[in-house]
Image (spheres, rainbow, N blue to C red):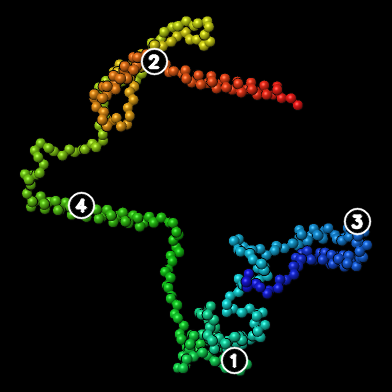
Amino acid sequence: LQGKRGIEKPVWQLPDFIAATGIEKLRQAYAEKEDSKKMKQKQRDRMQPKMGKMDIDYQVLHDAFFKYQTKPKLTYVGDLYYEGKEFESKTRDYKPGHLSSALKNALGMTDTNTPPPWLINMQRYGPPPSYPHMKIPGLNAPIPAGASFGYQPGGWGKPPVDEYGRPLYGDVFGAQPAPEEDQFEEEPIDRSKHWGDLEEEEEEEEEEEEEEEEEEEGEEKEVGEEDLQAGITSIDSLSTTPAGVETPDVIDLRKAQRKDTAEKPLYTVLEEKEERVAPTSLMGTTHTYVVPPADKAAAPKKDVKKGDRVEVTLQPEELEELDDAALAAKFKEAKDAEKRPEEREDFSDMVAEMEKKRKRKAQDKDKAVKKQKDFKF
């Protein structure tokens, strides 16, 4: 906002669609009437106010907001707003070097051959640094037809040239030939065919050519084999394959599946037994089935009795020096400990301590009760 200092902010005005209702004139007349009142009248109006002093048709207000309301100028998404931005002129539609008719009339450029007023300074100091490649007639581009250089009214000044008469900034005299644009010859377009049509004829011709080539190759191979058989002797005796080993015609690379000798039956018929329904059963059945035992081939696991197991506790540092003798000693020690009767833990000291604490608390409680009884006002 440093560049905004010294710029006078214009007074805020009502939008056009609200000012068209005439409410501004009513408010101004009401304010002038209030200013003309005395202090006593203002105090009376404050204590006993009167409503409806500004009488305006509500239909006019409705039309102003719902018919003639216009959208205000808003900033774009992500555009930064600063104070006074709405009062700046919009330069998005302007291009450097293109003068509008209103600007030409303001500068007095009524004719197309009239030079702009800044041309003399540009010829003296050079083109604008921000637009060095912009074509400006009389500076780096030829002047219009019918115009002439000079300082007379309507003259285009003096062209900027060096001591040898060569232009400084561009072709101001129009002597250089215009650059030839690259002209590309367009390929002729066959409009008789449509995009996506099937080219059956060409495919058939390609197939015929392929068949002819295959036939020619087959004939050449036959001639070559006859020549080889006639001029080359058999070399079976030089074969590197050992005797008795021949290459099989078919090699099966699939893994061989294991086949059991005994075929497993697809199903088993269970033996049915008749049963009596007990009178107390809720959902009884009159027959049951005998389920055969499991496969005897699978040996059942032996259950290890709890008495056969011995738990041995080992420290991590003992594992390095552990041998068969030390392990046997540990096992024997744990076995002897199991055989000995369980020794009960002695809690006599703990019970005595708890009893002392209980007696001490009871004595303290009795002393407190006695103090309360002995106290007198």
Residue wearing tag 2: 342
- In this view, the mark in front (4 or 2): 2
Upstream in sequence: badge 3 or badge 4: 3
- On the image, the x and y values in percent for residue 228 come to 11, 52
In three-dimensional space, the C-alpha distance between marks 1 and 3, rounded to whole angstroms, equals 78 Å
Between 103 and 323, which is closer to the camera in this rendering? 323
Residue wearing tag 4: 218
- In this view, the mark in front (1 or 4): 1
Query: Can the viewer see residue 148 in this picture?
Result: no
- Neighbor class of circle 1 (other Cα within 10 Å; few <14, some 14-19, many 20+) is some
Query: Can the viewer see residue 31 in this picture?
Result: yes
As drawn, 184 above or below 190:
below
Q: Amino acid at mark 3?
A: Met
Picture residue at 43% right of the left edge, 75% below the top: 183
Query: Do callouts 3 and 4 mark residues in contact (Cβ within 8 Å)?
Result: no
Element under label 3?
helix
Residue wearing tag 3: 47
Upstream in sequence: badge 1 or badge 3: 3
Residue wearing tag 1: 155
Upstream in sequence: badge 4 or badge 2: 4
Question: What is the quadrant of the C terminus in the image?
Answer: top right
- Neighbor class of circle 3 (other Cα within 10 Å; few <14, some 14-19, many 20+) is few
- In this view, the mark in front (1 or 3): 3
In three-dimensional space, the C-alpha distance between marks 1 and 4, rounded to whole angstroms, equals 91 Å
